[in-house]
Image (spheres, helix red, strand yellow):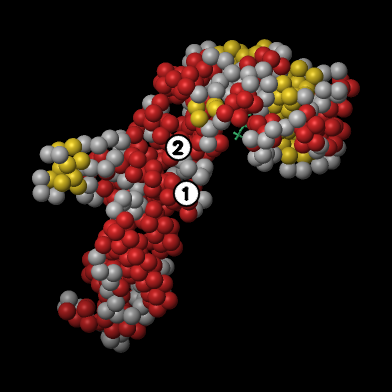
Amino acid sequence: MRKLTKEDLVRLLDHRIFHQISRLADAMGIECYVIGGYVRDLFLGRPSKDIDIVVVGSGIRLAQALAGMLGRGAHLSVFSNFGTAQVKYHGLEVEFVGARKESYSHDSRKPVVEDGTLEDDQNRRDFTINALAVCLNQPRFGELVDPFDGLLDMEDRLIRTPLDPDVTFSDDPLRMMRCVRFATQLNFFIDEETFEALARNKERIRIISKERVADELNKIMMTPTPSKGFVELERCGLLPLIFPELAALQGVEKVNGRAHKDNFYHTLEVLDNVCAQSDNLWLRWAALLHDIGKPRTKRFDPSLGWTFHNHNFIGAKMVPDIFRKMKLPMNEKMKYVQKLVGLHMRPIAIADDEVTDSAVRRLLFEAGDDIEDLMTLCEADITSRNAQRKRKFLDNFKLVRKKLVDLEERDRIRNFQPPVSGEEIMAVFGLSPCREVGTLKSAIKDAILDGVVPNEHDAAYAFMLERAAGMGLRPVEGKG
Ligand code: CTP
């Protein structure tokens, strides 16, 4: 955290827009402050484009005056129902709101709102670090108003609610997700009392829309170490309510003295490993879901120990349901996650054995353009504490990667299109769509993937004629 004096704040608020707001507010005789995330981020040295201004009076009137003063290039939107207004100006978004007092009913996030003082407004905010305000009026320009010791909390790296946390969370349960999200994003600790209130109020998360919860989860996922957020969600008991399939990975069972690893903590380790390599949100989701099928496939076999047969297939099947329930996009992103979950065992299986051309070609065929991401996921999945075992896998992965490059250059398998199409097969043998056409098509595909036939039309055609003859099929006149 940066230590900033009033002079520093004056310097940091040197953007034209703050001076214009200041002059207008003085001329209109109203108090106004920058508040919330923008001020927090000034102290944390994080970039921020969204500016929240709280006005003791009408935020809308001040916004209208500002838009008028800025003229062209400024865009004003007024939300009379909410008593707020927004001015967009050269990439900046400035929100204006009148200082307010809010009271909530038990079953809704919609508060009853009354005009209030700055203090009332700060009281209704979620965390002490988000309740900091800096005055914009002269001569107090740059003066910090910090009634809840938000600065001290920032120094101590603490997320804490300004009021009784039961009130803050019950008023707006989304704040429970925000609490965990900020702790993860900023790498802060959740204050003990605040944490206990998370546990007490967790059931209230049910009144929050799935979209908002997913939005917060995605913000957690985009931090450098999302595991921290998921551990907190698990510890306070929110996880089973918002993501039961992930919570089900937690725990270790022991039979005859043999235990399996805790798949929840293993998953989080894989997730963090992937995050160190990639900013791709959906690759991160694939890491989070890669073992999601394990609880449903877990068996104890007296000779083999714990097994999770087909957990990748079951996991891939679970992906659309999870995305639908959590209101994540049901589009190609979901398909991509599903594909990676389904394929995540393949490179390991190859690397555990002899790395053959045929196995690598098949992998390339199935993964297509997502092969690199799949390899990243699989390398992240090697969390063995046995250094020798880990080395062996990583070395074999290097071999798989090298073969991928060699085969890709030679055989163009990544976006494989069979060199002989179904239409051509039908024309050659005078067939209409039938089982034989499918059999021949997959025989050609297998022959190419197994390296029996090169990925070229004429060679594949000759192979087809030979295979068809064995099936008793003869080309129609002039096609042989
Ligand atoms: N706020 C709140 N309760 C919420 C949402 C927001 O008290 N459920 C208050 C906080 O004071 C917050 C401010 O409104 O700082 C602005 O909210 P928002 O823009 O959502 O968050 P930021 O704090 O700016 O952080 P970020 O942009 O990372 O979400």
Residue sitting at the far right = 27
Whether 11 is drawn above or below 59: the answer is: below
Instruction: Name the kind of residue labelled 2 in the image.
Output: Lys
Identify the residue shown where x is 82% and y is 26%: 141
Of 245 and 412, which appears nearest the observer? 245
The answer to whether residue 214 is above or below residue 141 is below
Q: Residue at x 24, y 65 (%)?
A: 353
300, above or below 474, in the image: above
Residue 275, numbered label:
1
Q: Secondary structure at mark 2?
A: helix
Q: Which quarter of the frame holds ligand 1?
A: top right
Confirm whether residue 445 shows in the render.
no
Residue 120 is left or right of residue 318, and the answer is: right
In percent of the image, x 42 and y 31: which residue is there? Answer: 233
Which quarter of the rendered picture does the C terminus lie within? bottom left
Looking at the image, residue 235 sits to the left or right of residue 3; the answer is left
Q: Which mark is residue 442?
A: none
Badge 1: residue crowd in 10 Å (few <14, some 14–19, many ≥20): many
Residue 224, given in percent of the width and then of the height, sits at 51, 45
Say above or below: 399 vs 102.
below
Look at mark 2 in the image and give the residue it sits on.
228
Disc 1 or 2, which lies upstream in sequence? 2
Nearer to us in this view, 410 or 453: 410
Say which residue appears at 17% left-offset and 79% top-offset. 470
- Image quarter for residue 451? bottom left
